[in-house]
Amino acid sequence: MSRYVLFFLLLPLALFSLTGCGYNTIQRNDEAVIAAWGNVEASYQRRSDLIPNLVETVKGYAAHEKDTLTAVTEARAKVGQMKLGADIVNDPAALQQFEAAQGSLTSALSKLMVVVEKYPDLKANQNFLDLQHQLEGTENRINVARVRYNDAVQVFNTSIRTFPNSLTNNLLLKLPRREPFKAEAGAEKAPAVKF
């Protein structure tokens, strides 16, 4: 009977000690680290998915703008190659060529003028700005995810190194300390911007 009395006396003590051992806290903190790392990976995946598509979009719109400028340059070159003189008025074929060349230049210039007039709303410009904002936003998301990961790592590492959780981890879980993100070598130096 003394065994039963001892058992009933030790049972509440054992239950009380288990609630304060930190097992569940360590598990919760471990899951927080795993989730935070998943967010870091998701941010990198977003960059991987988003940036190439945005770059292709910008290239497409930039090609439109480049085509307009190329058309103006070519039309201007054709007009510049024509030999002008007073006798052009007497040569219907030369006059027709001159008018055709000028018409091409006028057409190209009108396209360019539309581009210039709409420059604040220019699609290529807007896409470049969007690309810049998306790149900045993506890099910010990655940085935020890294900071949150480092915060989760700090909480986890603290939980496995403090008493009584350290005993629980050493005896039962044996989870290793997690490494936070660290700056790349040379990151303390400001990057050189060259144009």
Image (spheres, grey):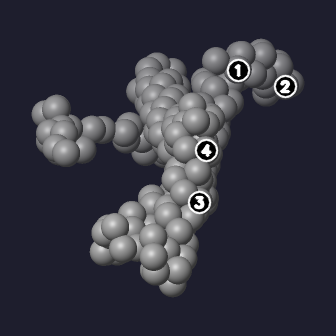
Q: Which residue is mark 4?
A: 114
Q: Position of residue 192 (x, y in %)?
A: 14, 39
Which mark is first along the chain, 3 or 2?
2
Q: Report the label total.
A: 4
Labels 2 and 4 touching (C-beta < 8 A): no
Which mark is first along the chain, 1 or 4?
1
The residue lying furthest to the bottom in this view is 93
Q: Secondary structure at mark 1?
A: helix
Q: Which residue is mark 3?
A: 107
Structural crowding at the residue carrying mark 3, measured as other residues with C-alpha within 10 Å and reported as few (<14), some (14–19) or many (≥20): some
Q: Which residue is mark 1?
A: 19
Q: Position of residue 101 (x, y in %)?
A: 49, 71
In 3D space, how far apart are the residues under numbered discs 2 and 3 (Cα atoms)? 102 Å
Labels 3 and 1 touching (C-beta < 8 A): no
Q: Secondary structure at mark 3?
A: helix
- Residue 184 drawn above or below residue 88: above
Which mark is first along the chain, 4 or 3?
3
In 3D space, how far apart are the residues under numbered discs 3 and 4 (Cα atoms)? 11 Å
110 left or right, relative to 69 = right
In 3D space, how far apart are the residues under numbered discs 1 and 2 (Cα atoms)? 23 Å
Between marks 4 and 1 in the image, the one whose residue lies nearer the viewer: 4
Residue type pointed to by label 2: Tyr
7 left or right, relative to 34 = right
Is residue 170 at least partly visible in the picture? no
Observer-nearest of 79 and 193: 79
Observer-nearest of 27 and 192: 192
Structural crowding at the residue carrying mark 4, measured as other residues with C-alpha within 10 Å and reported as few (<14), some (14–19) or many (≥20): few
Residue type pointed to by label 3: Ser
Residue type pointed to by label 1: Thr
